[in-house]
């Protein structure tokens, strides 16, 4: 405990520097641990107060949040920030407030005949201190989404936001500190070393959103403490245009879903599967749809920039490799603008003739680049999806219900939107999460509350009961009783 006491005073026992990120992190963690011990099952009134303060933070500081995210991206659509971040969080908070009383209620559970008149109950309880590691692509939504669920469940919360959005991350730390005690909800900033120390803490639950590769490292670090984890990852989410698809309706929706946040969305369509012979036609329609959405790009405030030079160069390299290996590359640049080297914006790019051997089809793209691949029949499309790791999202467009149901039943993905893109994420009455390499666990709505709760089973024994018949010394009475139970249990 001496090390923790010194940490609380700002001195690191490892490097003897003052202050030190490790000492600050440990001090905040210990404060939350002690606060939870003093109030391990907060009343609904307390939880609602925390949700109210989170909602007020969202409402009062919308412009500052939008501005900070825009500056970090070097051009992030304010409308997309309001829709995909602030709107989503407002909806989540209001939904949690409206349903919290029911979620917190202990529930009576059916009891086997042989154990009556005893009865069962299931009691939800907070886990303790929850750690949240949030990414850069939706820095407000993906920090506050799990946080509001953890607060609704009665936990204390520590958040480590991304260092790739330094202005927003600093703002978030400031706003949270102004609305919450440090032992309720706290934000700690820093680079890779801070992140490494953060995920190594013995949290009662650790929530991570990011890449599959980093998710594996987070899971390994958490395993050392037997910390349960929720991993919201990503992968190559396919979109399928069925032979019955109405292209006039599907293409604009697909273009919107792909280019929201310039494709820097974990559930963005990563590649498109179209019936054989339709790739050129679909590409032509996408070019027209994109031009309607974004008639200009370079100075268009609706079209978001790539977050960093590193990510920009990665996308450029993916396109160049595909082109070098024979793929047809279509750059969608409606106003024929010249993109200078220092520009962080990347024109929407369609890639026809991509193959599995290309990096473009091996890595999650995470940008405004869409490979279009043809399939001979539905069997081939389903096989293509199932030969890869399970995606976070899947999109199907068409009117043939038999084909739709085949895709739903014969593929496994985190979630699905039929005849549109992205919108399954916004459903508070359904869980959101991945499967396999695209993630583990889920949240949103009641599923978020359950993720950050322990549902404790309790059996209440009646004063008069028959369980004494199971006590030794055993004999014929026990055998007869067991024979009866074998027939009715």
Image (tube, helix red, strand yellow):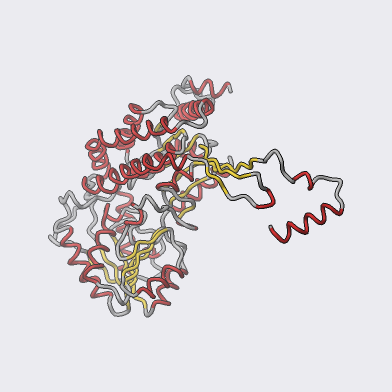
User: Is 12 positioned to the left or the right of 245 in the image?
Assistant: right
User: Could you tell me how many numbered marks the image carries?
Assistant: 0
User: Is 131 positioned to the left or the right of 465 in the image?
Assistant: left
Kindly tell me whether residue 4 is visible in this rendering: yes
User: Is 8 positioned to the left or the right of 239 in the image?
Assistant: right
User: Is 481 positioned to the left or the right of 11 in the image?
Assistant: right
Q: Which residue lies furthest to the left in this view?
A: 335
The residue at the point 43 percent across, 48 percent down is 443
Q: Which of 383 and 164 is in front in this view?
A: 383
Q: State the quadrant of the C terminus.
A: bottom right
Residue 371 higher or lower than 463, as above or below: below
Q: Which of 90 and 354 is in front in this view?
A: 90
Q: Nearer the viewer, residue 458 or 199?
A: 458
Kindly tell me whether residue 162 is visible in this rendering: no
**In the image, residue 485 lies at what x, y percent?**
73, 56
Q: State the quadrant of the N terminus.
A: top right
Residue 73 higher or lower than 276, as above or below: above
Residue 466 higher or lower than 374, as above or below: above
**In the image, residue 217 lies at what x, y percent?**
51, 47
**In the image, residue 206 lies at what x, y percent?**
49, 42
**In the image, residue 473 lies at what x, y percent?**
86, 46
The residue at the point 21 percent across, 47 percent down is 79
């Amino acid at each position: 405990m001496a090390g923790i006491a010194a940490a609380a005073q700002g001195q690191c026992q490892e490097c003897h520097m003052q202050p030190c990120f490790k000492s600050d992190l440990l001090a905040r963690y210990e404060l939350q641990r002690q606060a939870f011990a003093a109030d391990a099952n907060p009343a609904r009134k307390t939880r609602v107060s925390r949700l109210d303060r989170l909602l007020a933070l969202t409402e009062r500081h919308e412009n500052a949040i939008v501005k900070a995210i825009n500056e970090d991206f070097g051009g992030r659509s304010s409308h997309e920030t309001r829709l995909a971040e602030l709107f989503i969080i407002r909806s989540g908070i209001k939904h949690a407030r409206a349903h919290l009383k029911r979620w917190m209620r202990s529930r009576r559970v059916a009891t086997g005949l042989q154990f009556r008149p005893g009865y069962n109950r299931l009691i939800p309880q907070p886990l303790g201190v929850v750690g949240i590691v949030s990414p850069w692509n939706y820095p407000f939504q993906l920090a506050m989404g799990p946080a509001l669920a953890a607060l609704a469940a009665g936990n204390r919360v520590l958040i480590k936001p991304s260092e790739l959005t330094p202005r927003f991350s600093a703002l978030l730390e400031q706003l949270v500190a102004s609305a919450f005690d440090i032992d309720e909800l706290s934000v700690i900033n820093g680079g890779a070393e801070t992140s490494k120390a953060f995920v190594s803490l013995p949290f009662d639950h650790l929530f991570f959103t990011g890449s599959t590769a980093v998710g594996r490292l987070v899971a390994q670090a958490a395993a050392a403490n037997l910390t349960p984890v929720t991993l919201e990852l990503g992968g190559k989410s396919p979109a399928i245009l069925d032979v019955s698809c109405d292209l006039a309706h599907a293409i604009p929706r697909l273009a919107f879903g792909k280019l929201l946040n310039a494709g820097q969305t974990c559930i963005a369509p990563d590649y498109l599967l179209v019936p054989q012979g339709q790739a050129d036609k679909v590409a032509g329609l996408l070019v027209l749809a994109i031009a309607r959405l974004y008639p200009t790009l370079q100075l268009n405030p609706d079209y978001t920039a790539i977050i960093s030079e590193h990510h920009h160069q990665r996308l450029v390299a993916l396109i160049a490799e595909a082109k070098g290996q024979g793929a047809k590359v279509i750059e969608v640049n409606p106003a024929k603008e010249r993109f200078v080297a220092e520009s962080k914006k990347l024109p929407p790019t369609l890639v026809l003739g991509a193959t599995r051997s290309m990096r473009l089809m091996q890595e999650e793209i995470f940008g405004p680049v869409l490979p279009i691949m043809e399939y001979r029949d539905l069997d081939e499309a389903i096989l293509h999806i199932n030969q890869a790791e399970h995606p976070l999202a899947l999109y199907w467009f068409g009117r043939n219900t038999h084909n739709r149901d085949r895709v739903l039943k014969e593929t496994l993905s985190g979630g699905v939107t039929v005849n549109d893109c992205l919108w399954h994420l916004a459903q508070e009455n359904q869980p959101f999460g991945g499967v396999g390499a695209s993630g583990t666990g889920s949240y949103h709505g009641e599923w978020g509350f359950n993720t950050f709760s322990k549902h404790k089973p309790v059996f209440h024994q009646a004063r008069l009961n028959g369980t004494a018949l199971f006590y030794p010394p055993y004999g014929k009475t026990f055998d007869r009783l067991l024979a009866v139970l074998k027939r009715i249990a």
